[in-house]
Amino acid sequence: MLRYTLKRLTSLVISLCVASLVIFLVIEVAPGDPASFMLGINAQPDTVAALRTELGLDVPKYIRYLDWVGGMVQGDFGTSYTYRTPVTKMIGDRLWVSLPLAIYALTLSTLIAFPVGIYAASRRGKLGDAVVMGATQLGVAVPNFWFAMMAVLVFAINLRWFSAGGFPGWDKGIFGGLKALTLPAIALALPQASILARVMRSSLLDMLGEDFMRTARAKGLTRRQALWRHALRNAMIPVLTIIGLQFSFLLAGSIIIEQVFFLPGLGRLVFQSISQRDLIVVESVVMLLVFSVIVVNFAVDLAYAAVDPRLRSRT
């Protein structure tokens, strides 16, 4: 297990190095100059040059890259061009919205998908299976922002159970914060639950056709007992893959939902920073999101080894 972990850890470090270089190069070649954008079209060239020097934009790109990476290693993401505020503080404030939202949505998605997928697999070819597959197909096809708007219309405007948007802050209480994140989490969770339920059903059905399942049935286990005792654990590998990918998506891909509900999260921060040409914020937030994706994939790899010992023996 130690050798397997070290191998995956080495891959993680290499991936982070490559990702940081790609992110820096892609953002640096984007058209537009932050100093010119901040000062406006009527700014004098000498004023623009002075601001570029103040922001550190006049030094060679490779030096800026090394300074950026070195700062991130020490926990310093630089200073925002627009707000003149440490990027670390800006990310920290927004992360306390995006991270709980992603965890909340992933929890809802898993709680919905597991029983639904298991139920559909146990009722293969029957009415219950058909209903579940139809509902999940609809959930995959409908975009999450449509669910968000319908949730606002029904639960915020008509029933008045929730607010239509905004976030009161965790200092107002955990209940208030979770209540504000409930509708966004549901809107994010429903499409992901549909995908996860279909993967769970498909993986379980594959396991039910294996030789070891026929052996279990021959020993006297019922179909339900064989499914819960043997098929479920062996079906978890593709399911864990989807869960890992979903968490990364929910953390990094909730820009539209945060815009719909006016949530001050990382997605909205990236959107605002791109529109303001605040490159250091964009680079740092995107790098943080990439880091979360790679770390989650690393954790999923370790979960693979815990679920399937054959993976450890191959290394």
Image (spheres, rainbow, N blue to C red):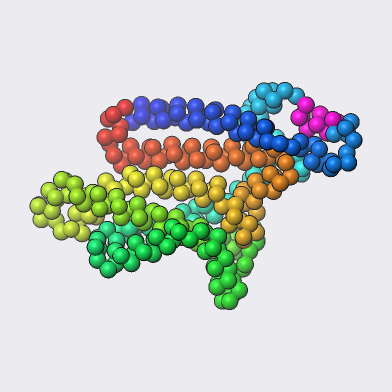
Percent across and percent down for residue 266 are 62, 48
Q: Quadrant of residue 298?
A: top left
Query: Horizontal placement of 297 versus 228: left or right?
Result: right
Query: In this view of the protein, can residue 111 be seen by the observer?
Result: no
Number of labelled discs?
0
For the N terminus, the image quarter is top left
* The magenta segment: 49-58
Asked if the stretch drawn in magenta spans residue 78, the answer is no
Q: Which of 178 and 152 is in front in this view?
A: 152
- The residue that appears at 69% across and 48% down in the rendered structure is 272
Do we see residue 117 in this rendering? Answer: yes
Which residue occupies the extreme bottom position in the image? 158
Residue at 68% from the left image edge and 44% from the top image edge: 274
User: Residue shown at 52%/59% (left/top)?
Assistant: 144
Query: Residue 63: x percent and y percent?
Result: 69, 23
Q: Where is residue 106 in the image (x, y as percent from the top left)?
A: 46, 54
